[in-house]
Image (cartoon, rainbow, N blue to C red):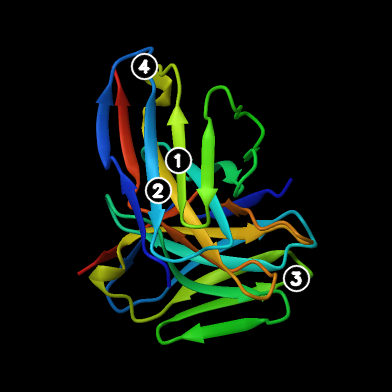
Amino acid sequence: SAVISQKPSRDICQRGTSLTIQCQVDSQVTMMFWYRQQPGQSLTLIATANQGSEATYESGFVIDKFPISRPNLTFSTLTVSNMSPEDSSIYLCSGETSGDGAAGELFFGEGSRLTVL
Amino acid sequence: GENVEQHPSTLSVQEGDSAVIKCTYSDSASNYFPWYKQELGKRPQLIIDIRSNVGEKKDQRIAVTLNKTAKHFSLHITETQPEDSAVYFCASVEGGSARQLTFGSGTQLTVLP
């Protein structure tokens, strides 16, 4: 199994600022994803982080608001840009390891809890 | 895209009783169905999963069943213990080359001592 580390674990941010969340995996993973989880809610996929190319965003999420990088197979960043109170949430990095082309087990980081004032 | 519905949203059981959580999915080509447990303030963790070529899978006190015809799958926990209290999420992956998980809305399970 893979161990995923995220930082910061939590932060309090001012409206209009941007924050970058870092995600480090201890081994190479085939896929990396970023999810958002509002308090008491389910997980919503923001985007798939593609190594060396632009991320693939889900409906309702755009690159200008959530730029994502993935320079290699073990590291990714998510930036929450021009934050507003509605962006207050937990952001989760995840990685998937699968050697046979089929969907495999998804591992999650500890999450980054952002509060926007 | 895929739509996953989960119920009940909350479930309370007495310690030692069984708990059942049900999910339905919309994409008939979906082929992978994991279940995650999330304790308060912790990350979601995979507890069991099933693929579309299998009807049932067990791991000690936990089992998952899949009915492809009806497009639903269920999590069964037997001999529940207080440490089973958590939020449980079902999920599915669309068929084909898709790898992204779509999650259900979650079930808060409370095991009463």
Element on which disc 4 rests: loop
Q: Separation of disc 4 and disc 3 at Cα?
A: 47 Å
Q: Is residue B65 above or below residue A92?
A: below
The residue positioned 76% from the left and 61% from the top of the image is: B95
Residue occupied by mark 4: A17
For discs 3 and 1, the disc positioned in front in the rendered view: 1
Quick one: A111 or B16, which is closer to the camera? A111
Q: What residue type is disc 4 on?
A: Thr
Whether tag 2 and tag 4 are in contact, CB under 8 A, the answer is no
Which numbered circle lies on residue B68? Answer: 3
Q: What residue type is disc 3 on?
A: Lys
Q: Separation of disc 4 and disc 1 at Cα?
A: 16 Å
Whether tag 2 and tag 3 are in contact, CB under 8 A, the answer is no
Quick one: A23 or B21, which is closer to the camera? A23
Element on which disc 1 rests: strand
Whether tag 2 and tag 1 are in contact, CB under 8 A, the answer is yes
Q: What residue type is disc 1 on?
A: Thr
Residue occupied by mark 2: A23
Residue occupied by mark 1: A77
Q: Position of residue A54 (x, y in %)?
A: 64, 38
Occupied quadrant, residue B51: bottom right
